[in-house]
Image (tube, coloured by chain):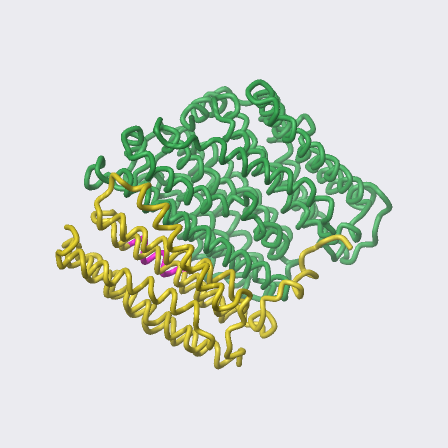
Chain colours: A green, B yellow
Amino acid sequence: MALQWVIVFFPWAGALALAAIPDLRRATAANVVVSAGTFALAVALAVMPFAEHGWTRTDALNIPFVLVSAFVGLTTSVFSAATLDQEGFDHWRIRAYHAAYQVFMGAQFLALLADNLGVMWVAVEIATLATVSMVAVHRTPAAFEAAWKFFILCGVGIALALFGTIVLYLAAQPLLHEDAGLSWAALMQVAARCDPATLNLAFAFLLLGYGTKAGLVPLHSWLPDAHAEGPVPISAVLSGLLLNAAMLAVLRAKSIVGANPGAIAPGPFLLALGLASVLLAAFALWRRADARRFFGWSSIEHMGIAAFAFGLGGPAANLAGLLHLLGHSLVKSAVFFGVGRAAQAKGSQKISDIGGLVATHPALGWGLALAIAGLAGLPPFLLFASEFRLLSAAAAAMPWLALPLAFGMVVALAALITVLQALCFGPPTPDAAAAPDGWREAAAAAPLWLHLALAAILALAMPTALAAMLMQAARVIG
Amino acid sequence: MSFGQIGYDVAHLLGGGVLLLSFVLLYQRRIGAVINAFAMQGALLALAAAWAAHTQSAPGLYVTALLAMAAKGVLIPLALHGIVRRLDLHRTVETALGIGPSLMAGVALVALSILVVLPATEGVRALARENLALALSVVLLGMLMMISRRNAISQVIGLLSLENGLILAAIGVAGMPLVVELSTAALVLMIAVVAGVFAFQIRERFDTLDTGSLEEHRGERR
């Protein structure tokens, strides 16, 4: 079996095994082992030359995301091992949680690596199904509400994406070989000669469909609630990984439509959705009382920024968008580790109930403070580099659009700094739970600091191989 | 294949029947009748898939037809009837938009989908593009049902009928690869949604989707 499939089926096999382990300690340890194996596979995949293999492909566009996904999957499993006892699961839920986690990871890799757009669609669907059950796992009215909204809205979203996929095939059908089917590479080759009007129709549905999954306004309303209910590690992988896979699907569709000179330019649509997301989220951030919903809204803002970058197009802006997606994965999952741990310690995820973390939990508090600062786009983290590149590219190409974008970023930055001060500094609030033993506290804080370190290293000294890969990817998207 | 040939005419008849049943779904006032109309639509879709398998000589589509008949014609409707009985839901459909206005909106959506699809697909064979227009109409009517009905069961049926539209689109494209796999995957999603209704059974959630009662969960500052 080719490595592209091994990395998909290894977590799935792990899911089967994990479904049989009812013991909390052993299950969390096995989950870390499976995630570590997956990470090793991802590294092996990254050093292999790019190849197309059946329904999958490896190229400059997806390998960086595979690496980051495997890394976040590993650190999240460590965080999960240190904090899962706080969720209060019985043994059935422990089995279901770990199985769903690994099913999600496998589907995430399949969605990233798929060359066949039909396979990509199925992978996004599996990832959705695996996470819905986890959002509902606490069985409170709010959790059911969140899961139901997630399910129905994303159900409509992926249904529209399938319709778009069918129309896309219809557009390319006269030009394709019998078995080339829905291959992205084959579609790219014939895209220039396809019927432009049919391509337009396909793109509209693909953008709406996968855009729903990426949390772009106006189809975003599932996202904050889905990130606020359910176990903390699920929020981290939803925000850090699933949104990227959906955005990558949008980019694949965009590159096909963009390769046809007669079709509508896809850029302005992404620009409009991106700008709407940034502006709406920037103001919505000010109205949140719930810390995890707050950072869910911040994901909408960041997806908007990335969509804006890809809408702007051109190598510089595309590179900024890719860096932004990668940086957001790292920093946002770090924030969820911090906020999730803080909410467990304080017994509430309301912003007003969490305060003065720096005084009571220094490692957690400072880490969270730095992560939120990174999320706000302050140096030295990767999101600063990407936002700076994006703003300069936007100012050069479309100064009038750079203005509202910068405005939205500043409003969001102010909201983030306000929440940073409330959560980390300010007067300490009493702890609800007794502090766990030392190694657990350390294992819960370590992934956060590791993510911060990586986000800073990538911003200050990105490995040249990765940089070259991202430059190449930026040209692929067009 | 063109107008007047039996393959074309029957395919159109079946596709048109699926669309007609989308309208039937829109004007039912009792939840039981909505479920029955959905079962009819599923059965008709299965016939359309079987006919496509016959005319396109694509035996794989018989699998799609069989699955659609078993799941959408029989099992899902039975499950939905069971949910209504077990949760003792309101037997009448609560509409956010009246029956008359929703039918008018439905007609407008069909007109819209024809106006969008036919000019956009001039390069495509006649049957495929007209089938696509019918399918898009079914998709849009499913969405209309989801937004114009208040209780969750009707919304689920809206989503299921939206998915019927997708399958109709997929089977109309002769030679599309993976069509059986994709339609099966879509069906799995829909079964999961119905299972979700079972799993999330909270009375107050499924009696009404009055958004006012959800505000407390949204984490807004007050």
- Residue B72, percent across and down? 34, 68
Q: Is residue A76 above or below residue A176?
A: below
Given residues B177 and A429, the one toward you in this image is B177
Residue A215 visible in this rendered orientation of the protein = yes
Magenta residue check for A258: no
- Residue A225, by quadrant, is bottom right
The structure residue drawn at horizontal position 38% and vertical position 53%, both measured from the top left corner, is B111
Q: Quadrant of the N terminus of chain A?
A: top left
Q: Is residue A67 left or right of residue A344?
A: left
- Residue A346, percent across and down? 76, 54
The structure residue drawn at horizontal position 44% and vertical position 78%, both measured from the top left corner, is B82
- Residue A324, by quadrant, is top right
- Residue A263, percent across and down? 37, 32
The structure residue drawn at horizontal position 57% and vertical position 73%, both measured from the top left corner, is B207
Most frequent secondary structure within the magenta stretch? helix
Q: Is residue A163 above or below residue A188?
A: below
Given residues A423 and B69, the one toward you in this image is B69
Q: Is residue A200 above or below residue B145?
A: above
Q: Is residue A306 left or right of residue B35?
A: right
The structure residue drawn at horizontal position 47% and vertical position 42%, both measured from the top left corner, is A246
Given residues B47 and A104, the one toward you in this image is B47
Q: Is residue A204 left or right of residue A328?
A: left
- Residue A22, percent across and down? 52, 63
- Residue B143, by quadrant, is bottom left
Q: Which residues are magenta?
A: B181-189
Residue A81 visible in this rendered orientation of the protein = no
